[in-house]
Amino acid sequence: MSLSRNQVKHVAKLANLPLTPQEEEKYSEQLSKILDYIDQLNSVDTSGVEPTFNVSGQENMMSEDKLGDCTISQEDTLSNTPKEERGFFVTKGVFEG
């Protein structure tokens, strides 16, 4: 399966990716090779193969939630911050220019 440059242009436009004509050609070739490989994988007969969801056999180890002493003073909390003001962390503004 091959993708045309117009199809690559369309996908790039949807993703808001500006591409040069050289990049369009390059990605058209690369994506076509990927789709060809996927077609090749889809042609393999897997009817006798059971689906595998976890190849390692490991399972999640869950521990019981327990309440513990989780108090920490404000002074200790702020002890490693580079900048603090009136008991609060001071960070760089997100919307500042």
Image: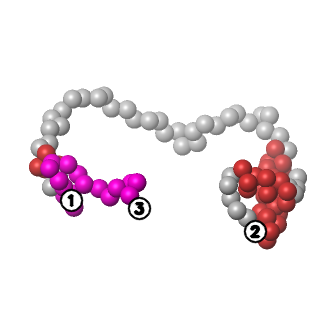
Task: Residue 41: say if magenta.
Answer: no
| Mark 3 closeness class: few <14, some 14–19, many ≥20 residues within 10 Å | few
Q: Which of 93/53 is in front? A: 93
Please tell me which residue is depicted at 21% across the width and 29% down the height of the picture: 67
Mark 1–mark 2 Cα distance, whole angstroms, equals 45 Å
Q: Main secondary structure of the magenta part?
A: loop
Please tell me which residue is depicted at 33% across the width and 32% down the height of the picture: 63
Element under disc 2: loop
Which one is earlier in the sequence, the residue at label 3 or at label 2? Answer: 2
**Residue bearing the label numbered 3:** 97
Q: Which of 96/4 is in front? A: 96
The magenta span reads: 80-96
**Residue bearing the label numbered 1:** 83
Q: Is residue 97 left or right of residue 71?
A: right
Number of disc labels: 3
Return the mark for residue 73: none
Which one is earlier in the sequence, the residue at label 3 or at label 1? Answer: 1
**Residue bearing the label numbered 2:** 20
Which one is earlier in the sequence, the residue at label 1 or at label 2? Answer: 2
Establish if 61 lies above or below 43. above
Residue type at the position of mark 1: Lys
Q: Is residue 64 left or right of residue 22?
A: left
Image coordinates for residue 47, horizontal then vertical, percent: 80, 34
Image coordinates for residue 92, horizontal then vertical, percent: 32, 58
Mark 3–mark 2 Cα distance, whole angstroms, equals 31 Å
